[in-house]
Amino acid sequence: MVPVKGYTRAAFLGVYAYCVYHTVVNYLVDYAVCLGNSMTPLLNEDGDGDVVLVNIAAKRLGRIKQNDVVISRQPNCPDKIIGKRIIGMGGDRIRTGDDEIMRVPRGHVWLEGCHPTSYDSRHFGPVPYALIKGKVFFRVWPKFGPVK
């Protein structure tokens, strides 16, 4: 029989491992699977999906800027997670899909996919900054390397 001390140690290590995992995934780095063609050719070229790393700390530290690829919740369907490029930050003037000039409201970003038929801010408008999860910075699968 294993002494009670062994179970206590194993339980402690399990709780400790979970706490480390929780901290990393919620405050530092997480992963996402990019499906669909909205970011083709940058991501998901072969249609099987790309696994990317997301820098969550970048949002908390205010290091998200124009032209970064981000993971965000879709404003008109918050259960859906999307990956898009930031075209404009709050206060910027951008050209919409209708060739209309628009100022992005403070506290919002304008997101667009690389593909012309992408469902993005051209359809649902500016996205509140609070809906951004983080900045995509590295592709893990199927290709390996930084995302720019």
Image (spheres, rainbow, N blue to C red):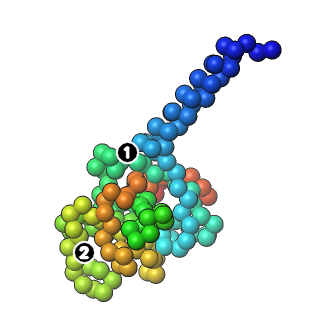
Q: Return the x and y of residue 141 as percentages of the image width and height.
A: 60, 55
Quadrant into which the N terminus falls: top right
Query: Which residue occupies 59% across, 23% down?
Result: 12
Query: Which residue occupies 45% across, 77% down?
Result: 118
Quadrant into which the C terminus falls: bottom left
- Is residue 144 among the parts visible in the rendering? no
Please identify the residue farthest to the right as the structure is shown: 1
Tag 1 secondary structure: helix
Q: CA distance from mark 1 to mark 2?
A: 27 Å
Q: Earlier in the sequence, mark 1 or mark 2?
A: 1
Q: Amino acid at mark 2?
A: Ile
- Is residue 99 among the parts visible in the rendering? yes
Please identify the residue farthest to the bottom as the structure is shown: 98
Q: Amino acid at mark 1?
A: Ala
Tag 2 secondary structure: strand
Q: How many marks?
A: 2
Q: Which residue is mark 2?
A: 94
Query: Which residue occupies 53% across, 56% down?
Result: 32
Residue 57: image tag: 1
Q: Is residue 140 left or right of residue 7?
A: left
